[in-house]
């Protein structure tokens, strides 16, 4: 009779372990999917922000170009057109970022760095370990004991 209960309990224990493992697997997949969707939304927000900046900068560029060309036509002084050179580069950069393939080029460069220059991505002194975290916590507590806060 005792053996029957032990076998039955072991079977239930194994079933519970398998159930917990499947639940943990589902939970992990959901977390990964959530992180991926949040990253997609952040990228979409960044693209929208770049497009908005591009539109504002283009409007500024058109207004300033109109004013500079008007001044140039009246005075025939070429130095009035000089501010258009850096403004042109900045405007074209934002057009490339907002509507061109600059984001794809950035992503390709990031993939290249991750595959061929992985050593530059390492954390200084490696990843924190539980022992290093506890050591830091103990040091802070010790400093509080040595130098108590003045109230």
Image: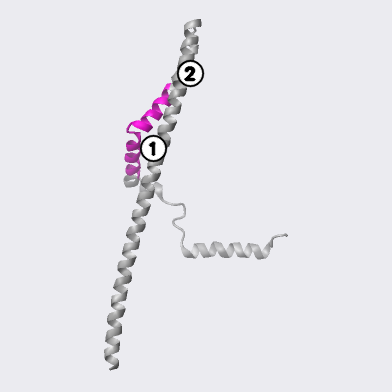
Helix, strand or loop at disc 2? helix
Q: Is residue 135 magenta?
A: no
Q: Earlier in the sequence, mark 1 or mark 2?
A: 1
Span highlighted in magenta in the image: 88-113
65 lies above or below 33 = above
Q: Residues within 10 Å of mark 1 (few under 14, many from 20)?
A: some
Residue at image mark 1: 47
Q: Residue at x 46, y 52 (%)?
A: 124
Residue at image mark 2: 64
144 lies above or below 76 = below
29 lies above or below 47 = below
Q: Is residue 96 magenta?
A: yes
Task: Give residue 109's position: percent from left, percent from top.
Answer: 34, 39
Q: Residue at x 34, y 61 (%)?
A: 28
Marks 1 and 2 in Cβ contact (< 8 Å): no
Q: Residues within 10 Å of mark 2 (few under 14, many from 20)?
A: some
Task: Give residue 75's position: percent from left, percent from top.
Answer: 51, 5
Count of marks placed on residues: 2
Left or right: 79 in relation to 3 = right
Task: Give residue 15's position: percent from left, percent from top.
Answer: 28, 76
Secondary structure mostly seen in magenta is helix
């Amino acid at each position: 009779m005792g053996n029957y209960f032990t076998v039955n309990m072991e079977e239930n224990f194994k079933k519970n372990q398998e159930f917990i493992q499947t639940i943990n697997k589902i939970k992990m997949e959901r977390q990964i999917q959530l992180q991926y969707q949040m990253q997609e939304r952040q990228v979409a927000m960044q693209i929208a922000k770049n497009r908005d900046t591009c539109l504002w900068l283009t409007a500024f560029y058109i207004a300033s170009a109109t004013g500079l060309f008007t001044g140039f036509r009246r005075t025939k002084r070429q130095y009035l057109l000089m501010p258009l050179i850096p403004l042109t580069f900045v405007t074209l950069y934002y057009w490339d970022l907002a509507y061109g393939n600059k984001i794809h080029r950035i992503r390709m460069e990031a993939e290249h760095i991750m595959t061929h220059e992985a050593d530059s991505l390492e954390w200084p002194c490696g990843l924190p370990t539980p022992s290093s975290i506890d050591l830091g916590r103990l040091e802070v507590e010790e400093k509080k004991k040595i130098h108590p806060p003045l109230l």
